[in-house]
Image (tube, rainbow, N blue to C red):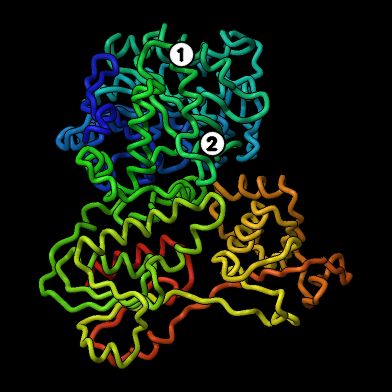
Amino acid sequence: MDSLTKLFEPANIGTMQLKNRIIMAPMGTFFADDDGLVTERLRRYYAERAKGGVALIVVEITAVAPEGKASARELRIYGDGVIPGLKRLADAVHRNGAKIAIQFHHAGRQRGAEASDGPPGPPVAPSAIPCRLMKVMPRALTIGEIEGLVEAFAEAARRAQEAGFDAVMHHGAHGYLICQFLSPYSNKRTDKYGGDLDGRMRFALEIVAQSKEKVGADFPMLVRISADEYVPGGLAIDETRIVAQRLQDAGVHCVDVSAGNYESGHMTVQPGWLPRGCLVPLVMEIKKAVTIPVSVAGRINDPVLANSIIEQGKTDFVSLGRPLLADAEFPNKAREGRLEDIRMCTACCLCMDTVVANEQPLVCAVNATVGKEEESTLVPASKSKRVLVVGGGPAGMEAARVAAARGHTVTLCERGNSLGGQLLIAAIPPGKEELANITRFLSRELSKLGVDVRLGEKATIESIAEMKPDAVVVATGSFTVLPDIDGASLPHVALARDVLMDRKMVGQKVVVVGGGRVGCETADLLLNQGKDVTLVRMTGRGRLAGDIGVLTRRQYLARLRQSPMTIEANSPVERITKEGVIITKDGESTLVEANSVVLAPAPRPDNQLAEQLKDIVPELHVIGDCADPRGIIDAIHEGFRVGREL
């Protein structure tokens, strides 16, 4: 495609020629086995991304030493016994048309007390300063131990080269060990590995030098850096420009630019409220300082944006992580000009919430096949069925898409006038706009696959009987009703859904009742509209915004708390009056004045039709919120599963 010429122009990193300028950024998966070895699942996952057209895959964080593992199931590269498995991984990626590198990692102070495979004891770090997020006091490394870790990184490079990898990447970003040494925030040493920038850079430069001794000066080497840690007193661009220059002087062939550490995690895995390409200003500064190629990550989910920043000389490569989870075929589709066919990342951060916070294998909210590439292959149905899907939300659309792709004749009835269901509401709050991409993608897929979409048509027992379907998939979603609160029926009271959809206007002074995601996001929207907002969380059970992912919740709440909004936590609502809301605060009745009250109760499943169809239709499936109100991932993954099983 002419407009994306620059993105698909061949380019080199050192002696390694790449077919385009798209790099798959390293992302932890938990697809390794309990010993940190390569599994068939891991091979299939990376092979699928290679087949999708990416030029270079950088394999996820890979521990260079037992005590450096951030989690028990992190991939490892210490011990020569790992080489055969890594070779099978490299061969699988090569067979599918991509080059492969691997990212060497040591967590340093950013690991829990139980994550290590090494001897018992605290994590190690440049200085005995704990990460404020992990809250585990590390032990300062001795000079002898530092020298041993330099050797460990270098030996990792040797093993990767022997396994057939095309390049290596040292992880000097995100607050891990190399970054900890570089940063004045975490390195308070007074010996040769601390002090001024020259001292703090010594560890990284020794790793580069010793690695090159093992693999040769020309073996392609990348280093990932946090160009800004976004913490007071941390690394910032004035120093990282010098770091990049010194890395170039040491023989590094590419600097990959990221940002943040665990304490500023929203800059490491950027949520939707940050703009696309949010790290481009940082890479521009790094590019001014070096002549070697640079790459940049950070909310680049659009190939037009990717091409533009390369074309304008702001970067040489783009590092795409989550976009290649959402759609492994992103590069191929972009190259072929099929931009509307790309299933775009929504920046929901669920993938990293699952891995980092919950220590569970990687998932993607919008792509049910991640980590299940082989078993999720869509095979033609042995017998074509007449399938009726009732409900045009994410669950219904995905079920219809998959069923039609397998050769079934699919009709989808949606009682509303547009597809999207709860996505139409979910995409409205600030920072959630990317969720509309799901509706656009699935709507287009249904049209391409010839699904008979009937908008404004409510399915009934009678109409379904007339259609005579072989299978019915009920995905009728959920609804909310006014809770049993005295005064809830007053005219100035509204449900959050109605406010979000502009079906009910509110006054200037608003009380939002409900401390979950919907309540918080509604309050956020009203704040953006210039309203005076008080958020009331009725009970002490759970946490404010507890249904938002861990990685994004902390920064999201910090943003809300810095706003002019008032938060009344653990404040039961006694009643609603014309003057506002009376809550119980510190054991006393207190009036929170308002001219509008917005209620955000928990949704209820809309399962009436599903109950009526039991024992009536030949095959019945109930999915999504009408089975149990949950999240987008549950809706889409259930839709995929049922569409594949039909």
Closest to the observer, 509 or 401: 509
Q: Classify residue 228 as left or right of residue 338.
A: right
State which quarter of the image contains the N terminus.
top left
Does 440 sit above or below residue 89?
Answer: below
Closer mark to the observer between disc 2 and disc 1: 1
The residue that label 1 is drawn on is 288
Question: Can see residue 606?
Answer: yes
The numbered mark, 2 or 1, whose residue comes first in the sequence reads 2
In which quadrant of the rendered view does residue 3 lie?
Answer: top left
User: Label 1: how many residues lie within 10 Å, few (<14), some (14-19) or many (20+)?
Assistant: few
Residue at (13, 74) in percent of width and height: 384
In which quadrant of the rendered view does residue 24 lie?
Answer: top left
Q: Residue 188, position in %: x, y?
A: 66, 18
Q: Residue 338, position in %: x, y?
A: 23, 46
State which quarter of the image contains the C terminus.
bottom left
Does 463 sit above or below residue 500?
Answer: below
Closest to the observer, 361 or 247: 247
Residue at (56, 8) in percent of width and height: 198
Q: Residue 156, position in %: x, y?
A: 35, 23
Residue at (40, 43) in percent of width and height: 73
Q: Classify residue 118 as left or right of residue 543.
A: left
Q: Residue 636, position in %: x, y?
A: 36, 63
Residue type at tag 1: Lys
The residue that label 2 is drawn on is 267
Question: Can see residue 39?
Answer: no
Q: Which type of secondary structure does the marked residue at label 1 adopt?
A: helix
Residue type at tag 2: Met
Does 499 sit above or below residue 20?
Answer: below
Closest to the observer, 265 or 454: 454
User: Label 2: how many residues lie within 10 Å, few (<14), some (14-19) or many (20+)?
Assistant: many
